[in-house]
Amino acid sequence: GAVVSQHPSWVICKSGTSVKIECRSLDFQATTMFWYRQFPKQSLMLMATSNEGSKATYEQGVEKDKFLINHASLTLSTLTVTSAHPEDSSFYICSLQGWDQPQHFGDGTRLSIL
Amino acid sequence: GNSVTQMEGPVTLSEEAFLTINCTYTATGYPSLFWYVQYPGEGLQLLLKATKADDKGSNKGFEATYRKETTSFHLEKGSVQVSDSAVYFCALVPIQGAQKLVFGQGTRLTINP
């Protein structure tokens, strides 16, 4: 069964709205959490990495004030897209990793900004 | 630097055909290698992995062998099914440093009945 729960799976909202995406580990403690963005028919682009107890490390070109990441606990990470605009529309995927484990991916969130 | 290059898609095959999706990599050191599969509208699922040279990863009829001499990790399946239709990603994790996955560009596979 699934070990990572990502919610919501699909969200449509108006431009200027802030959207929060949650990613939960269901049966293990996630010491490291990753957030990816995927454009249609393209590969995954790593946005940021967060380790337990520390702030997220953002990849070059990713605006940290735009994409707020909170590694709230060993089982929960959230990505908030602040003041979203149509160019932020994309498929966002989280992945979680525990000790001596491979990354487990969520099912993704399709974000559509009108 | 670290990079992964995959066979360009899309790939379209008939059911029961033999599948090969090529993957080559560039890495400093000795990476671990992975194949992930993404079904429509879903996240990624780990299909198989290999952590050292000559290791063979296998799962659900798929196989890939870690070839250090050719820096390759080609994905194969002897007889594909319609349910194998998905996007396949080759990826690596450098042994040293953080556990960041480096993905190839993905190969879309469609199997026709």
Image (cartoon, rainbow, N blue to C red):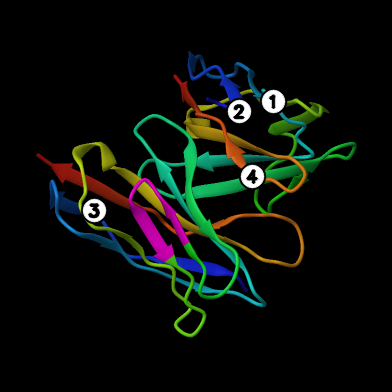
Q: Nearer the viewer, mark 2 or mark 3?
A: 2
- The chain to which mark 3 is attached is B
Q: Indicate which disc, 4 or 2, sits on the residue closer to the N terminus.
A: 2
Q: Mark 4 to mark 2: distance in Å?
A: 22 Å
- Whether labels 3 and 4 belong to a single chain: the reply is no
Q: Indicate which disc, 1 or 2, sits on the residue closer to the N terminus.
A: 2
The image shows residue B32, relative to residue B60, as above or below, that is below
Circle 2 SS class: loop
Judge from the rendering whether residue B61 lies leftward or rightward of residue A75; answer left or right.
Answer: left
Tell whether position A78 is magenta: no
Numbered label attached to residue B10: 3
Decide which of B12, B17 is in the foreground and name it.
Answer: B17
Q: Are marks 1 and 3 in contact (CB under 8 Å)?
A: no
Tell whether position B63 is magenta: yes
- The chain to which mark 1 is attached is A
Q: Residue furthest bottom?
A: B69
The part of the image, by quadrant, that contains residue A72 is top right
Q: Are marks 3 and 4 in contact (CB under 8 Å)?
A: no
Q: Nearer the viewer, mark 4 or mark 2?
A: 2
The three-letter amino acid code for the residue at tag 1 is Asp
Q: Are marks 1 and 2 in contact (CB under 8 Å)?
A: yes
Q: Indicate which disc, 1 or 4, sits on the residue closer to the N terminus.
A: 1
Q: Report the residue marked by disc 1.
A: A27
The image shows residue A4, relative to residue B49, as above or below, that is above
Q: Residue furthest right?
A: A53
The three-letter amino acid code for the residue at tag 2 is Val
Decide which of B67, A51 is in the foreground and name it.
Answer: B67
User: What residue span does the magenta drawing correspond to?
Assistant: B57-64
> Which residue is rendered at x = 44% and y = 82% of the image?
B70
Q: Report the residue marked by disc 2.
A: A3
